[in-house]
Image: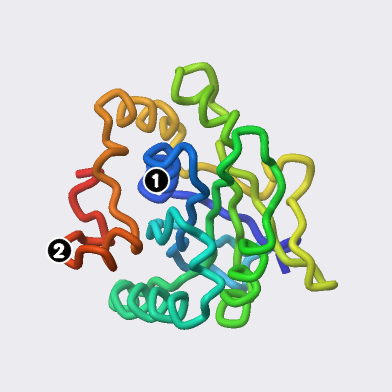
Amino acid sequence: MGVECRYEIAQAAYVKLALHALKHPSAAVNGLLVGRLLDSAASPAVVSVVDAVPLSHQPHHLPLLPTLELALTLVEDHFAAQGLAVVGYYHANARRDDAELPAVAKRVGDHIFRYFPRAAVLLLDNEKLEKVVKGNSRDAVVQLYTRDSSKSWRQAGSDGSSQLSLKEPSTNVVLADHVTTKKWQQVVDFDDHLDDISKDWLNPSLLG
């Protein structure tokens, strides 16, 4: 269904997932994308990604269905009152030069697809992120993958640019500013919360 759909990423979601990756530069990280389908009757339909929930910096945990289900339930329950739902998943590989969508991302994407058939998987491009942090690029640091009719996850277009857009044009400037102030140190993911329940996986004050 990805061919008929565009995806718009809000600044909060984009910055949060990038900071999550920057906090764990030598590890793979991942999380959930929260948003809504703006108008299913529109052509193309638009999925608005308004927030990101960092899940793990140890992604080998995520194929464990009970852990993923717990995270999904908590996230869905929290955001449902705002009319939001889990609309996708993001992943950053551990290696700087690794641009392949890993099997774990596809498995989690498949799971979310069961609940939200326009699910998106975003793969963070570590090399583009480095350029943005240095103030040398305005390109989005994520690549969009959608599931096709053969149930395979494929990158949208050559770079996904036609289907993927940043809601706020200044998003990369804001991200670079947050890196300057070392905001990435404050990111809490679901792994951190399970280790210490006093740490809030919602990161309410991260971008405040």
Q: Mark 1: few, some, or many residues within 10 Å (few <14, many ≥20)?
A: many
Say which residue label 2 marks: 198
- Residue 108 image position (x, y, % from top left): 59, 70
Which residue: 69% across, 53% down?
101
Marks 1 and 2, how far apart in space?
19 Å
Question: Which dot, 1 or 2, sits closer to the camera?
Answer: 2
SS class, disc 2:
loop
Q: Residues within 10 Å of mark 2 (few under 14, many from 20)?
A: few
124 vs 207, nearest the viewer = 124
Residue linked to disc 1: 20
- The structure residue drawn at horizontal position 23% and vertical position 46%, both measured from the top left corner, is 206
Residue furthest right in the image: 150
- Identity of the residue drawn at 21% across and 61% down: 200
Q: In this view, does 115 lie to the left or right of 196?
A: right
Question: Is disc 1 in contact with disc 2, using a CB cutoff of under 8 Å?
Answer: no
> Element at badge 1?
helix
Q: In which quarter of the image is the N terminus?
A: bottom right
